Amino acid sequence: MEFRQTRQGYVDALIELARENPLIVVLDADVAKATRTVEFETAFPERFFNCGVQEGNMISVAAGLALEGFIPFATTFGVFASCRAADQVRNSVAYSKLNVKIAATHCGISTGGDGASHQANEDIAIMRSFPNMTVLVPGDYEEARQATRAAAAFSGPVYLRLGRDTYPVVEEIHGPFEIGKAKPLAAGRDVTIITTGIMASEGLQAVELLAREGISAELLHMPTVKPLDEQAILDSARRTGAVVTAEEHSIIGGLGEAVAACLAERCPALLRRVGVRDVFGESGMAQELLTLYGLRASNIAAAACELLGAKRQSGRTP
Amino acid sequence: MDPAVLADLTRKAREIRRTILTMIHRANSGHPGGSLSAVEIVVALYYHLMRHDPRDPRRPDRDRFILSKGHCAPVLYAVLADCGYFPKEDLETFRRPGSHLQGHPAQHKTPGVEASTGTLGLGLSTGLGMALAAKLRRQLHYYYILCGDGELQEGQVWEAAMFGRKYALDNVIAFIDRNYLQTDGHTEQVMPLDPLAAKWRAFDWNTYEIDGHNLEAIIETVRHARSVRGRPAMIVARTTKGKGVSFMEDDAGWHGKPPTREEYERAMKELEGGV
């Protein structure tokens, strides 16, 4: 299996985009070597602005650039983009629906050794709560490249969620990328698995694990968490009546809660959320943390089995 | 300076003060103190210094004004309406549901408003980002940004101070409405700012200290600031909060309080006097 970085997919797309469109500019807040925007700086030094350690100022400056017609990609770690600069994202960018792209790397528990202070597990919750905001969570290098290009082509604020570690390349998710559209990866009858971000590869493995137990699982990958592809969720949930969501993010406010709200209002179904359980993370290797915090295919499969048990016990079909 | 021009601007300032009070009184909500203290700065800019065209609010070579102290929206709305960016009748809808005139400026709602502000400390950064865009395009227009003094207690302002100097944004001419009062009282008691001009000099901005109610001083200082290359300008404009209405002057209580009918009538009477 090949492993690559989503942040590299982002920067490779930026360099392609900058060649095509003179309005693309990039800002960073003293983490250019880590976010990889240093490669953009080398290619286009006159279109790169290092704001130093000032995330709030960077986002408001990006708003100013967008007001004058540029397409700024403001880049920093997810914790800083979402928590430190939440005020600027809300008031400078989202309120006036400005064409600012917020690229957040080092998101999720797999940020690893830096520990809880640097592991953004709340960023999707914060960003999707802002009106006018679009939230993209690509699953691998190629999908990050696609998502970056889609963000540039889209008019309006976008939060682009990226990771630090290398993650499996998942051929199955490389189909056409359309903001707001789910990617169906497997068809099944018994349970629906919905993944976002790097959980796509775990979801695919979970489908295989469940098949061995004679369980037919459907898999929807959602690289857009907002706007949510409600139709895809409802179409699948109506058939299976049982849904497992999986995200490398808190179970509070992320994909799982978005799906829960959609189901509760329009198609009540059994639901389990796989994600970080309302706790802070800790230091460790990315791969061992994913296991430790229950973000593996085996966790998704176990949640699905539990759901099917509940479905049988309740004796009801949706 | 031509005395006739100065007399016109002085008359205009009084008229704008009356409009501000009328808006806030009618809405029974708003911020009179800081709106009144900024009148001469905004009047000098829109009626004398800035190149702008109300018939074409988006023309690329216009000078831009950003009200970073967004709670003083009434002074901006009064001037924009008077210039013709939108009908004066709209002022009657200030702070009402369905109005484009929000309590704090909304760029996407009001013609002539260049940036949404309201959360303090953000507008200077936004203005610098806009000015950076103009530099990238080699455009020659100016960005005038008005900050409150209490607002400078926000850390982001000092982030912006570093940023503006780094990118040599000499197309930025910023003002501080230095009225020494904020919501909870005197700035030097709530969170001291002095020596304020020294702070901006230390950040290597081209810094001035002037009387912010002296129209001639404002105009001369801006002209001088335009001639200085390589650094942004900060004009610390000493003002009186509530300027022009005797019982509002220098009283923090008028930061965000609308006048009663009696107070409004008294204030309007005071503002009817000659130049």
Image: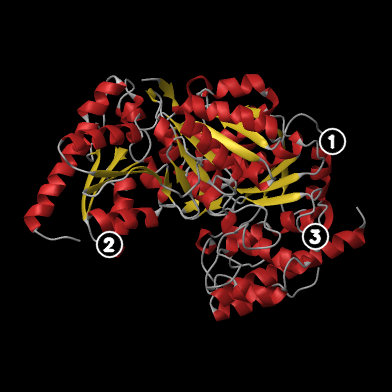
> Camera-side residue: A90 or B187?
A90
Q: Is residue B185 above or below residue B168?
A: below
Q: Residue at x 16, y 40 (%)?
A: A214
> Camera-side residue: B7 or A258?
A258
Three-letter code for the amino acid on which mark 2 is drawn: Cys
Q: In the image, which is nearer the foreground, mark 3 or mark 2?
A: 2
- Per the image, label 1 sits on a secondary structure element best described as loop
Question: Label 1: how many residues lie within 10 Å, few (<14), some (14-19) or many (20+)?
Answer: few
- Labels 3, 1: one chain: yes
Q: In the image, which is nearer the foreground, mark 2 or mark 1?
A: 2
Three-letter code for the amino acid on which mark 1 is drawn: Ser
Q: Residue at x 45, y 49 (%)?
A: A181
| Side of B88 relative to B97 (left or right) | right
Real-space Cα separation, disc 3 to disc 1, in angstroms: 27 Å
Q: Is residue B20 above or below residue A69?
A: below
Asked if marks 2 and 1 touch (Cβ < 8 Å), the reply is no
> Camera-side residue: B173 or A92?
A92
Residue A244 appears at what percent x and percent y?
24, 45
Point out the image quarter for the N terminus of chain A: top left
Residue that carries the numbered disc 2 in the rendered image: A267
- Labels 3, 2: one chain: no
**Residue B172 visible in the shown view:** yes
Real-space Cα separation, disc 3 to disc 2, in angstroms: 50 Å
Q: Residue at x 36, y 33 (%)?
A: A198
Residue that carries the numbered disc 3 in the rendered image: B56
Residue that carries the numbered disc 1 in the rendered image: B227
Real-space Cα separation, disc 2 to disc 1, in angstroms: 67 Å
